[in-house]
Image: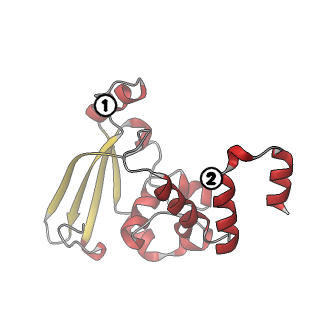
Amino acid sequence: MKAHNIRTEEIARIRVEAPYETVCLGTKLPATTEEAQFNLAWPLAALLIDGEVGPAQMPGYRFGDQRIRSLVEKIELVESEELNELYRLAITGDPQGKYASVVTIMLTDGRTFKSGIVEGDINYPQEGWDEDRIEDKFRWLTRYVVDGARSDELVEAVWHFEQVQNVSEFVEKRLS
């Protein structure tokens, strides 16, 4: 969308070709946080509207966001045998396997953009995931429930966890 300067208001349809396991996630509008997390359309639409998918996109009050709801209704999931095979290879550890999909965006003016096969970057270990990136993600995901000082304390505790002598005391101290 960035490469082609596409605005969400221009989208007529989004077609996601994917393996069976991905298609099963569905496009139903969620009524609960759990339904939103185990859904393909809601996080995709939220990503396109908000630019990210995280805690701010999953609480119940967001399910009334008409911009996201409207985009969810434009998303179609289609099972692909080619992507099923790549998925089967991936789950058996074959290096030719991929967790992938193909996304086609059709605009209201008739233009169409197709991604080609795109991997989901869910293989482990992922390139570029160093301690700084992990720490940044922790702080991003917990910013709504942990203040800065507490976050600093938790990060330090995790980075030095091998020095913990008594796990029960460690947990009790962190929960108090």
**Is 26 left, or right, of 64 in this rendering?**
left
Please name the residue that numbered disc 2 is placed on. 159
Give the quarter of the figure containing the N terminus.
Answer: bottom left
Q: CA distance from mark 2 to mark 1?
A: 36 Å
Give the quarter of the figure containing the C terminus.
Answer: bottom right
**Which SS class for mark 2?**
helix
Q: Amino acid at mark 2?
A: Trp
Residue situated in front as seen by the camera: 6 or 98: 98
Position of residue 93 measured from the top left corner of the image (x, y, whole percent):
39, 25
Q: Is residue 141 visible?
A: yes
Residue situated in front as seen by the camera: 26 or 85: 85
Q: Is residue 90 above or below residue 31?
A: above
Name the residue rendered at 38%, 50% in the picture.
Answer: 128
Q: Is residue 162 above or below residue 75?
A: above
Kindly check if marks 2 and 1 are in contact, taking CB atoms under 8 A apart as contact: no
Q: Amino acid at mark 1?
A: Leu
Please name the residue that numbered disc 1 is placed on. 86
Mark nearest the camera among 2 and 1 is: 2
**Which SS class for mark 1?**
helix
Residue situated in front as seen by the camera: 27 or 129: 129
Position of residue 107 measured from the top left corner of the image (x, y, whole percent):
20, 67
Position of residue 148 measured from the top left corner of the image (x, y, whole percent):
64, 74
Q: Is residue 120 above or below residue 143?
A: above
Name the residue rendered at 68%, 69% in the picture.
Answer: 146
Position of residue 97 measured from the top left corner of the image (x, y, whole percent):
32, 30
Q: Is residue 147 visible?
A: no
Colour style of the rendered protein structure: secondary structure
**Label 1 packing within 10 angstroms: few (<14), some (14-19), many (20+):** many
